[in-house]
């Protein structure tokens, strides 16, 4: 089955700097890669996603890149703000059916220093 | 966006009792629902996939007789933790997907979670 690895487990950056979180996946059949932000005690929130037919996607301060050959994908947050502090999860899935499972990475706890 | 609710949000029970958690899709019909468990400072671990009108598919290592799942309608799935023990204390989260034009990404819509504490 699919296995998603995520690094780093914790990340502390100065407010205004950029943060990068990296993930790898094992199943070449995966073609959908969502990223979630989870605040303490809350549900995961989808912040951005990318399909395997696209190499990069950007939404304001957030961007994701995907390297299908290397099975790597990354989340980039620019101009970080205090409200970006949370746990971020990468995930991998397929778009073939509504029953497709989402496999989560282990999470990255991002802290933004004022 | 699509809304998923869970009930209860928090439950505290004694060891040996059973606890039922409901997951409802409020404004759409969910052909598939997923149940996750999340221990403190850990990731979401998929427990089972629930399809309306059929038996749930459990992930490896998840006891189907301990975690009973019933997906009786297109808007409701329930997870019953039977004979709960302290090690079952966790944050249980459900999600739902919708087939068809509304969800071209097969996006999963998450419920707010249920925090279970077993004394």
Image: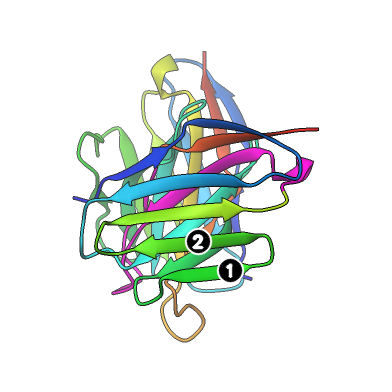
What secondary structure is marked by label 2? strand
**Circle 1 marks a residue in which chain?**
A
Pointer 2 with pointer 1, Cβ within 8 A: yes
Q: Let me know if residue A77 appears in the view.
A: yes
Above or below — where is B21 with respect to B86? below
**Circle 2 marks a residue in which chain?**
A
- Residue named by callout 1: A58
Q: Position of residue B118 (x, y in %)?
A: 50, 19
Dot 2: within a 10 Å radius of its alpha carbon, few (fewer than 14), some, or many (20 or more) residues? many
Q: Position of residue B10 (x, y in %)?
A: 62, 33
* Residue drawn at x 26%, y 57% as measured from the top left: A70
| Magenta-colored span | A80-105
Asked where in the image residue B31 lies, by quadrant, the reply is bottom left
What secondary structure is marked by label 1? strand
Above or below — where is B90 with respect to A104? above
Q: Decide which of tag 2 and tag 1 comes sooner along the chain.
A: 1
Q: Is residue B65 magenta?
A: no
Q: Position of residue B48 (x, y in %)?
A: 31, 48
Q: Please state if B26 lies on the left or on the right of A16 as rendered.
A: left
Asked where in the image residue B54 lies, by quadrant, the reply is bottom left
Tag of residue A64 = 2
Q: Is residue A83 magenta?
A: yes
């Amino acid at each position: 089955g699919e296995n998603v690895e995520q690094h780093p487990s914790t990340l502390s950056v100065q407010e205004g700097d950029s943060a990068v979180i990296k993930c790898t996946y094992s199943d070449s059949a995966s073609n959908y890669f969502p990223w979630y932000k989870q605040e303490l005690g809350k549900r995961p929130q989808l912040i951005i996603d990318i399909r395997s037919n696209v190499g990069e996607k950007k939404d304001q301060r957030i961007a994701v890149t995907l390297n299908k050959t290397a099975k790597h994908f990354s989340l980039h947050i620019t101009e970080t703000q205090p409200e970006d502090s949370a746990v971020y999860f990468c995930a991998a899935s397929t778009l073939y059916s509504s029953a497709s499972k989402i496999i989560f990475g282990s999470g990255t706890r991002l802290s933004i220093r004022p | 966006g699509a809304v998923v609710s869970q009930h209860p949000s928090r439950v505290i029970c004694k060891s040996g009792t059973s606890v039922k958690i409901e997951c409802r899709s409020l404004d759409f019909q969910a052909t598939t629902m997923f149940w996750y468990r999340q221990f403190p400072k850990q990731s979401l671990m998929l427990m089972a996939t629930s399809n309306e009108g059929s038996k749930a598919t459990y992930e490896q290592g998840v006891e189907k007789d301990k975690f009973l799942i019933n997906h009786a309608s297109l808007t409701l799935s329930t997870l019953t933790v039977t004979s709960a023990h302290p090690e079952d204390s966790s944050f249980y989260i459900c999600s739902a997907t919708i087939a068809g034009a509304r969800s071209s990404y097969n996006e999963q819509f998450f419920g707010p979670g249920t925090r279970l504490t077993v004394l």
